[in-house]
Image: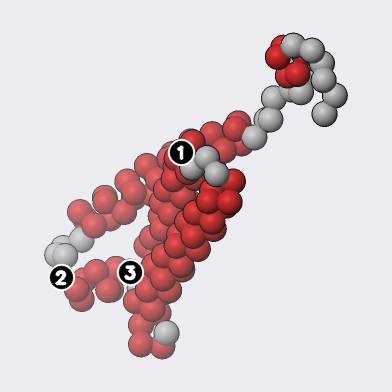
Amino acid sequence: MVDKGTPLGEVRGTGAAHAGTHHWMQQRVTAASNLFVMGYFIVSLLLLPSLDGATIRDWLSGLIPSTMLILLVISLFWHARLGLQVMIEDYVHDTGNRFAVTVVLNLLFAGGAALAIVSILKIALGAAA
């Protein structure tokens, strides 16, 4: 790196990273989708005649409820992953540790979302799944 003399000279011309805007927008979009899909989920459950296992299973076997529940899982897991990623970036300062924790975070959230989606599909498709 070329010595530019002063601290201001070192940073002048480097520009912004432009990485935060996309992340911030994703966080807001997932928050809005969480409100919409969670609202649907809550209203749908309140409209059911009862909340026993058979009624929930019958309700979840429908195309729209199972699809909306899968969308809710994706949105919730993505939103939570984005929030925890920001915490990791802010508080884990060592590059190697930050990379390792981020990889573990991504694996846990991908695995959790996959497990939830497979469980929803298993219930929605009945004994065939």
Q: In the rendered view, how is the structure colored?
A: secondary structure
Q: Residues within 10 Å of mark 3 (few under 14, many from 20)?
A: many
Q: Which of the 4 quarters of the picture holds residue 64?
A: bottom left
Real-space Cα separation, disc 1 to disc 2, in angstroms: 44 Å
Q: Which mark, residue 91?
A: 1
Look at the image and tell me in which quarter the C terminus lies. bottom left
Residue 40, horizontal then vertical, whole percent: 34, 50
Q: Residue at x 33, y 69 (%)?
A: 60
Name the kind of residue labelled 2 in the image.
Asp
Q: Is 27 located above or below residue 17 in the figure?
A: below
Name the kind of residue labelled 3 in the image.
Leu
Residue carrying label 2: 52
Closest to the observer: 83 or 3? 3
Residue 9, horizontal then vertical, whole percent: 77, 13
Q: Residue at x 46, y 67 (%)?
A: 111
Q: Which of the 4 quarters of the picture holds residue 120?
A: bottom left
Residue 48, horizontal then vertical, whole percent: 20, 61
Residue carrying label 3: 60
Q: Residues within 10 Å of mark 1 (few under 14, many from 20)?
A: few
Q: Residue at x 43, y 54 (%)?
A: 77
At mark 2, the secondary structure is loop
Q: Along the horizontal axis of the image, is 21 left or right of 15?
A: left
The tag earlier along the polypeptide, 3 or 2, is: 2
Q: Residues within 10 Å of mark 2 (few under 14, many from 20)?
A: few
Can you see residue 80? yes
Numbered label tally:
3
